[in-house]
Image (cartoon, rainbow, N blue to C red):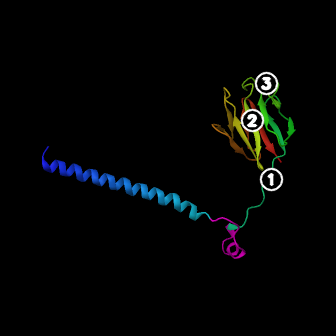
Amino acid sequence: MNELTLTFLRLGFLVLMWVLVFSIVGAMRRDLAVGRRNKTGAPTPRQVRKNPELAEPPARQQAHHLVVVEGPLAGTSMPLGESPILLGRAQEATLVLEDDYASGRHARLFPQGSRWFIEDLGSTNGTYLADRQLTRAQPVELNAPIRIGKTVIELRP
């Protein structure tokens, strides 16, 4: 290898190292800047007058009933409490589904704070929330369809 090639290799390595350093510094600045953009605490009345979008949104309705909308148990309704609801064909399930496409322990509906979440428990045919298959626990909005096999359930106020 001649001297000129070695010098270009050294220069290329040096440029590559500086690019790496600048990308790390840029990523750190973006991470630190995210915290600065989000203000905590309630806006002052003056800020709300200037920017009405800062006003607190109206309180959302909470779910009080689980209603079966489609499937063999259509029309069935059960009140929601503080405990999780197991959905499936097994007799120990809170809501026993008479659906050949449901697993024994198919899904779990559970409260967390003021919201309800649904998670699939490793079922064969999957659990769908508003036509999207669950891969992890997801929050359930009011009247959003939850499909387990041929059964569709919704949370209602």
Q: Secondary structure at mark 2?
A: strand
Q: Amino acid at mark 2?
A: Arg
Residue 46 within the magenta-colored segment of the rendering: yes
Q: Is residue 40 depicted above or below 125 in this figure?
A: below
- Which label lies toward us, 1 or 2? 2
Q: Amino acid at mark 1?
A: Gln
Q: Secondary structure at mark 3?
A: loop
Location of mark 2 (residue): 108
Distance of label 1 from label 2 (alpha carbons):
21 Å
Residue 133's quadrant in the figure? top right
Find residue 36 and report its horizontal and vertical position in percent.
57, 64
Residue 52's quadrant in the figure? bottom right
Residue under the point 72% across and 32% down? 148
Q: Residues within 10 Å of mark 1 (few under 14, many from 20)?
A: few
Location of mark 3 (residue): 90
Location of mark 1 (residue): 61
Q: Secondary structure at mark 1?
A: loop
Please state, as top left, top right, bottom left or bottom right, where the N terminus lies in the image: top left
Q: Is residue 138 depicted above or below 90 in this figure?
A: below
In this rendering, position of residue 78 left or right of residue 22: right
Q: Amino acid at mark 3?
A: Ala
Residue 69 - label: none
Find residue 62 and report its horizontal and vertical position in percent.
81, 50
Find residue 129 and report its horizontal and vertical position in percent.
69, 39
The residue at the far left in this view is 2
Along the polypeptide, which appears first: circle 1 or circle 2?
Answer: 1
